[in-house]
Amino acid sequence: METRLPRAARRRNVLTALGLTLAVGVAAGLLISMSHGQTELSSIWRTLAAACIYTGLIGLPAAAFMDTLFTRLSTRGPLFRAAVAIAVLLAMTAAGCAAAGLVFIAIGWSSPELYWTNFVYSSRVALVIGAVITVSASAWEGLRHRLDASQLAEARAKELAAEARLQALEARVHPHFLFNTLNSVLSLIPADPVRAEELLENLARLLRFSLDAGRAGLIPLGDELRIVRDYLDIESARLGERLRTSMEVEPGLEARMVPPFALQTLVENSVRHAIAPRRRGGQLRIRARRSGDRLELSVWDDGDGFSRAALRPGHGLDNLEGRLAALFGGRGRLDIGRDGGGTAVTVEVPS
């Protein structure tokens, strides 16, 4: 099935053909005028006008027809395409020169008796110019097509690499999260089966969320906050008063889009490494706010802290940073720093 170019592309091609035709006509007219030793302005102008008429009657139909012709012959061999191009060039040159001769007779620039003499002369000049232009245009088109194909292949490779990296990172995040929450539920079954049953309902929601979120690159912040609350409910049942949490979310942010498990990963990192290992537990503060034209998600804990250099490949925060890069490029950021006697891990994404 033939593919039509967009209207803007067709308009651009027409303007390019008109500009090239005019430029060739002026250049050819100046060369002819100089070769004939013309010095009067009227003679030079007439030669330029005649050359532009020739190039217009030959070049514009060639520009409109040759591209379609070569598209249809793209599956044929190069020798066949070259033979067809030569035949079409000869035919269009002859037709353009014949039509130009009739135009000159009609406007009084030539007499009928000189028609064939002018036809033979103009055809030879036009063939030389046409051959040079055809070879140059063919070389340029071939180079442009190869460049376009190379750029398209490079862009597609980057897109596929980003998609593959994102899928691999998400596949590692989901099991890591689910196994930890399941262990939390299992630890409660012997002591408090009723509470364990409630937490299993939370876990069921988390399982459904993980399955649904895997189909989308971004989710509303409101959904992410719900999974964080479910996770904290499970961990609170396991840690009791050792886990002290607070949450501050600016109004109107629930509909903003964020990567799934972005905030939950920050919360889980603090619970596992800063609060759960200590007998006295610790404090956890969760915050979501606007920061200019960006959305800032931050989790602070009162643990001993860590540096970016301490992140291991495959670590939850390392995976999150990889997902931010795959989704947002340089527009997504993860920061780690000491703040008020504790450690704050912050994710910034375009809002």
Image: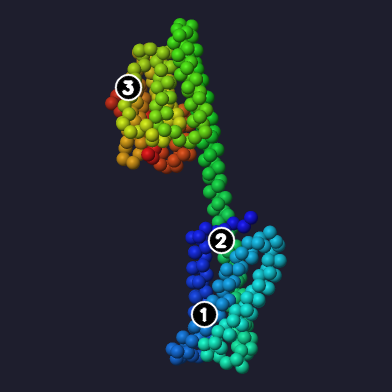
Work out whether residue 317 or residue 25 is closer to the camera in this orientation and state it.
25
Q: Is residue 122 left or right of residue 80?
A: left
> Residue 79 placed where, x, y %?
71, 66
Is 195 rendered above or below residue 154? above
Can residue 105 be seen at all in this image of the molecule? yes
The residue most toward the left is: 340
Q: Earlier in the sequence, mark 1 or mark 3?
A: 1
> Residue 21 placed where, x, y %?
52, 74
Work out whether residue 266 or residue 181 is closer to the camera in this orientation and state it.
181
Under mark 3, the amino acid is: Ser
Residue position marked by numbered label 3 in the rendering: 246
- Residue at 58% x, 72% y: name it: 61
Q: Is residue 101 left or right of residue 228?
A: right
Which label number is shown at residue 144?
A: 2
> Residue 150 placed where, x, y %?
57, 54
Residue position marked by numbered label 1 in the rendering: 52
Under mark 2, the amino acid is: Arg
Question: CA gap, disc 2 to disc 1?
Answer: 27 Å
